[in-house]
Amino acid sequence: MNEYALGQGLWEMGFAAAVPFTLVALSAMAVLLADLWLLPSQKRALPWAALAGVLLSAASVAFLWNEEATGFGGAIRLDRFSAFFAMVFLLGTGLVVLLSSAYARREGVERGEYYALLLFGTSGAMLMASAVELVTFFLGLEILSVSLYVLSGFFRQRPASAEAAAKYFILGAFASAFLLYGIALFYGASGSTTYAALRESFGSAAFPYSHGLLALAASGLLLIGLAFKLGAVPFHMWVPDTYEGAPTTITAYMSVVSKAAAAAAFIRVFGASLSSLQQDTSAVLWVLAVVTMTLGNVVAIAQTNIKRMLAYSSIAHAGYLLVALTAAGEAGYSSVLFYVLAYVFMTLGAFGVVSLVRKGEGGADAGAEALDISHYSGLAGRHGLLAAAMAVFMVSLSGIPPTAGFFAKFYVFSAAVRAGEVGLAIIGVLNSLVSVYFYMRIVFLMYMKEETVPVRGSRSRAGWVALAACVLGTLLLGVLPSSFARLATESIASIF
Amino acid sequence: MELPVLSLVTFIPLVGAIVVLLMSSENEKAVKATSTVFSGISFVFSVVLMVAYNRAIPDFQFVERASWIPQINVWYYVGVDGISITMVFLTALLSFMSVIGSFGIKDRVKQYFALFLLLQTAMTGVFVALDFFLFYVFWEAMLVPMYFLIGIWGGPRREYAAIKFFLYTLLGSVAILLAILAMYFSTTPHTFDIVELGKTHPFAPGLQMILFLALFLGFAIKVPVFPFHTWLPDAHVEAPTAISVILAGVLLKMGTYGIFRISYPILPDAARDFAPFLAVLAVINIVYGALVAMGQKDLKKLVAYSSVSHMGYVLLGLAAMTPTAMNGAMLQMFAHGIITGSLFLLVGVIYDRAHHRDIDGFGGLAVQLPIYTGIMSLACFASLGLPGLAGFIAEFMTFVGAFPVFKTIVMISAVGIVITAGYFLWTLQRMFLGKPQEKYAGFPDLSARELVTLVPLQVLTVFIGVYPWLIIDFMNSSMESLSHFLRGV
Amino acid sequence: MTTLLFVLGSIAAIVSALSVVTRRNPVHSALSLIVCLLSVALLFLLLGAQFVAAIQVIVYAGAIVVLFLFVVMLLNVKDESAVFHSGIAQKLAALALVFVILVQVVLVAVAGATWLGKEQWLAATGLSFGTVQSVGRELFARYLFQFEVVSVLLLVAIVGAVTLVKKKQ
């Protein structure tokens, strides 16, 4: 009877809203425990255990798809928006786990902690997207960040990996401090940390001037914290080094999940709660968007390491996301959601290919990761399918139809035009023109150059499944974007 | 249920591409046969289209319409009228001929044909799309296979040519995209419907000019209009033979087609204001292209620059806006497609044998390759505008139609005809007359496969030259209504 | 009595804070910091925030400063000039930052109280703000979820720390 009461009590507190998060966190703990019991020869089961956790949580999200609930006195909320992002995170995590199953073993980091931290990170991201209270949001961000600090330093023997982790950690700690200070100011001004209270205090224009100032300062601090997570210029300094030094699968995870989570939190805080400050934030975002896109694309051209190039490309894509966030409104935010989904497929795919190739026989460092862009010369000759997949992702990242990247950009830029930001749209379009150069260079090398360094592709079946899923997703979102766009619109409608 | 002929013409090659991709790359013969069959079926349907088309009315026919992305009012909306039907036919014909003409490809055969079929779908799509979004998707989707086809199977400087083509065209596309977005958001309700916009043409004159210029940038790069033509000689020269045929025969037409289909009906005021400038650009194209062509030593480059010159006639016809001139321009698009297509095929033939294209390096080929000489001469005569052949009718109509509007410009353009005649005759003389050279003695004349690709085009050239109404009949009613609309008659 | 204690505590806090930044010997700085933190704890006590005062003593004066001292001793730093060379620009920047933060704190305190009104402010934050009962109630009722989530965060931090320092198997 007691158990029943406890269960019912929990449910009445709105536990439903926290179910997907709880399941992922519990799976992470289960993976940690399983790691203790498994013999070294059985460690291959770890990725499958992690995948089971992801699927379990995804099933719970699907089950709660049409539900709405606010949990624990307004800490966390389940609605279509949370569900959409939970699915995006779980999709990204699932694909990363599949890619890792070969990569982690090859690179000697197949440990329980690796998968457990991936799942913990995902739980943090889910919390960021579903939180409707600043402390909860902050805790989610910290769970995600701490997991990523450790994961990016997972190659303990490699100085680059340690550098990646150290840079990310120190700058990340700064960003967290800014964020926390912003939260404190909001609390000071409104006496509460819930988004609902924020909306009440600052939703109407009727608050006194001093409070406007306070809200602006707090918003600015919060914005800095989120821009850091998003990898927007000028808070992008960590991105290239961390992306380059971290294990490739983790880089993929970082670029997708962490960015999506920051965008989700941004929409909840600034879009849904602080819409009265929109004019002020828009002006800042406009500048951020322009410098982020431009710097990302221009610097990417000069890169010789493929992970660094993709790092700058991810900065550029953060810029496109900022364009959509500047446009705001339901159209702008819907386009963010669509963009994030498209981005999962194309970016994970690109990093996935990177994680699957390595140097072949003949060199001094056979078996090492093939990270130089020149290693991709002539890839099509030996590994036609890998090269074809990479070509699809590159075409999509440069925004050429009929791929996901095209419609995503179209959606973003048309939202910008609709919001009257024609100049921003033009700058964005020109930027994506610049980006074609470095994306197509990879295609060019793969197809039109002779092999210089022998490169081998992994035969990992799990990895290939993940790549196939990414290719399919990239094409499907490009050819039939309608139902996904509707999903994005509905998700946004659920929080306004 | 009616047969969705247009979708079939458009997407059968795509199906072919997927089938080819699934085949074993070892079996090259099967790959070639499959590609021929799929491209052939598409061609057959395009013939069906021509036969069933009602030439008396200028309206869109074979219309198919289905909601695609309802959130932003995007439709899968296709149809043909007098402006596009001949282009659809031309695309299917030249693609079919090019597939057969590509049997000589030895490297990565499977990928080549898959990409080629993909390209065919995208090209056809551009001509049938009646929704801006769809149009743009096809327009852009064409770039990627083209990039690969030039970059992998092209000549020595293929990489440079491929990326230059890609970036140039993309720059133009971006301008088109912005114009499309601007149109979309300045209509209420927001629409991408080309037909609807052509009926209502709801934009203020100032906005029209901005839109016109943005669109023109995109189309002009494709045509190519001087000074945006620099990608063309590189791409044409480096591309493999069949791709040069497609580039000259189909891709260049997309620029002028875009002006016919989009700029003119939707932005009539801007079009009228811009017409004199267009005429000036046209005459520059005609004369400059011809002069540069005259200076070429490389046969393929010569043909490439002759295209710049010949597309100038199309622009002139467009600028004049009279029914005769526009019919002439449209006919020139078709005639230039088959004539320059054959010229590029012929350049490929001689290159396959001699492994060079230096005009001065040949001589006296008439004795060694009589059939080749005959067909080459026919194509050159057609291109320089010999009466009785397709090129003459088109140029003549353009001049007659444009003369009342731009007298001086037409007279200057006539100089272009003289120069064209000059360089083609000079080329024929250098290549075929004179003393036969020892090193070319063992060359086989045209093979059966080469004849299959060349003869139909020659027959069509002569036939249109004698009975041009065959093609004009298709476009006349659409051209007349467009012309009346533009000139406010 | 309260006022006297407040004035004493405040003066002690300010003087010791200044001494933290002016001492050249890092050990002296750390010791001054303990004094500073203890005097702030006293101020919290005067406000009736026993819990915060206790945390202040245990966590900051206890754990954190001891950590500082450990590091200082391990590095064996005798004089800060050996480690830091701060230029005039740096000092100015630090001053500016301090000023900004000060203004903000005052703004929050004054504006928060005036705009919401004292009653509302107290209602929002609670009269018993900072007592053991109120903190306990907040923590296990209103912020239950967040409290539980913190445990996940701590777990992640522990797992991470162990992962990074564990010897290779």
Image (tube, coloured by chain):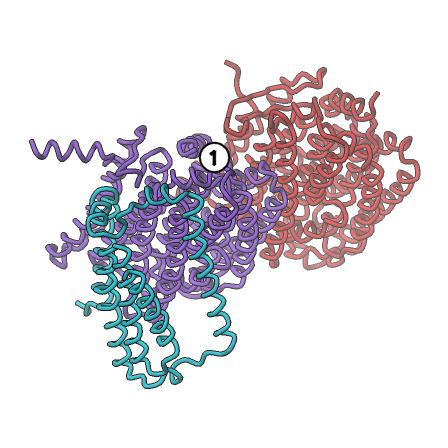
Which quarter of the rendering shows the N terminus of chain A?
top left
Q: Is residue B25 visible?
A: no
* Quadrant (top left/top right/bottom left/bottom right) for the C terminus of chain A: top left
Q: Which residue is mark 1?
A: A479
Q: Quadrant of residue B178?
A: top right
Q: Residues within 10 Å of mark 1 (few under 14, many from 20)?
A: some
Image x and y of residue B66, in percent: 52, 22
- In the picture, measured across the screen, residue A28 lies left or right of residue B166, that is left
Q: Is C123 placed left or right of A329 in the picture?
A: left
Among the chains pictured, the one given purple colouring is A
Parent chain of label 1: A
Q: Which chain is cyan?
A: C
Picture coordinates of residue B80, whole percent (x, y): 64, 24
Circle 1 SS class: helix
Q: Colour of chain B?
A: red
User: Residue drawn at (62%, 37%), measured in percent from left and top?
Assistant: B453
